[in-house]
């Protein structure tokens, strides 16, 4: 009797954990249960985050300076999430210095990479950047900023601390000129203030 209860509890635990992490799908020919990770539609994710207070992070950049999002109230903030092996991500990085040159001190820019601090220091050695380079983004706030939206993705946080623009990876993937897309989008928002 005790063995049956243990098996039932184990089965209940497996099913409830699987429901929390994914969706069940029955395979037709093998009758195996396949668990697919749950991924809400891009539009729903964006809708849930737009015009809400930005998720606060406290994280160090690759040079050891700590950044608290709350310290930048009164300035516009751009968060750009990248992977180093992503061509679109790297193309977008080119626009960040130019964006800072255009908008000056009124904007703070963060490039969050999933790479280690050591690898990023090697990559940026001798290259001057006008944006903050954040490392290990999976540890420092990435999931708060909709990891399901893919790479690259961009968040614009207004001066009051609200997320008012989100560009998911599919928009970048459909763009012929990512650099112009970023600069035009953020410049237009800033001009409209």
Image (cartoon, rainbow, N blue to C red):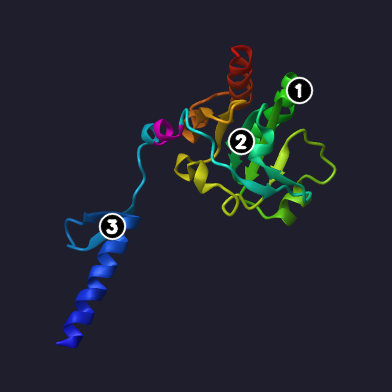
Q: Is residue 88 magenta?
A: no
Look at the image and tell me whether residue 120 can be seen: yes
Q: Secondary structure at mark 2?
A: strand
Quarter placement of the C terminus? top right
Q: Is residue 112 above or below residue 188?
A: below
The residue that appears at 70% across and 26% down in the rendered structure is 107
Residue to which mark 3 is pinned: 19
Q: Which residues are magenta?
A: 45-49
Q: Is residue 42 left or right of residue 163?
A: left
Q: CA distance from mark 3 to mark 2?
A: 32 Å
Residue 92 location in percent, x, y? 63, 32
Within-10-Å neighbours for mark 2: few <14, some 14–19, many 20+: some
Residue 134 location in percent, x, y? 68, 46
Q: Secondary structure at mark 3?
A: helix
Q: Nearer the viewer, residue 68 or 12?
A: 68
Residue to which mark 1 is pinned: 104
Mainly helix, strand or loop, the magenta region?
A: helix
Q: Is residue 154 above or below residue 57?
A: above
The residue that appears at 63% across and 12% down in the rendered structure is 191
Residue contact between numbered discs 1 and 2, judged by CB atoms under 8 Å? no
- The part of the image, by quadrant, that contains residue 183 is top right
Q: Is residue 121 left or right of residue 68?
A: right
Look at the image and tell me whether residue 98 can be seen: no
Quarter placement of the N terminus? bottom left
Residue 175 location in percent, x, y? 52, 25
Q: CA distance from mark 1 to mark 2?
A: 16 Å
Q: Is residue 48 magenta?
A: yes
Who comes first in sequence, dot 3 or dot 1?
A: 3
């Amino acid at each position: 009797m005790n063995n049956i209860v243990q098996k039932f509890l184990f089965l209940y635990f497996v099913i409830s954990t699987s429901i929390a992490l994914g969706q069940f799908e029955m395979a037709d020919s093998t009758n195996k249960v396949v668990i697919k990770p749950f991924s809400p539609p891009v539009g729903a994710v964006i809708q849930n985050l737009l015009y809400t207070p930005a998720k606060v992070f406290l994280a160090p950049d690759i040079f050891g300076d700590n950044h608290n999002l709350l310290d930048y109230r009164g300035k516009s903030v751009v968060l750009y999430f990248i992977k180093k092996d992503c061509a679109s991500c790297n193309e977008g990085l080119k626009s960040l210095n130019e964006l800072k040159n255009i908008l000056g001190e009124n904007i703070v820019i963060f490039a969050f990479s999933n790479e280690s601090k050591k690898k990023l220091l090697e990559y940026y050695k001798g290259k001057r950047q006008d944006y903050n380079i954040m490392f290990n983004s999976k540890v420092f706030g990435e999931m708060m900023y909709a990891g399901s939206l893919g790479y690259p993705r961009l968040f614009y946080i207004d001066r009051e601390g609200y997320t008012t623009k989100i560009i998911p990876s599919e928009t970048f993937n459909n763009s012929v000129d990512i650099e112009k897309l970023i600069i035009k989008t953020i410049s237009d928002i800033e001009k409209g203030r």
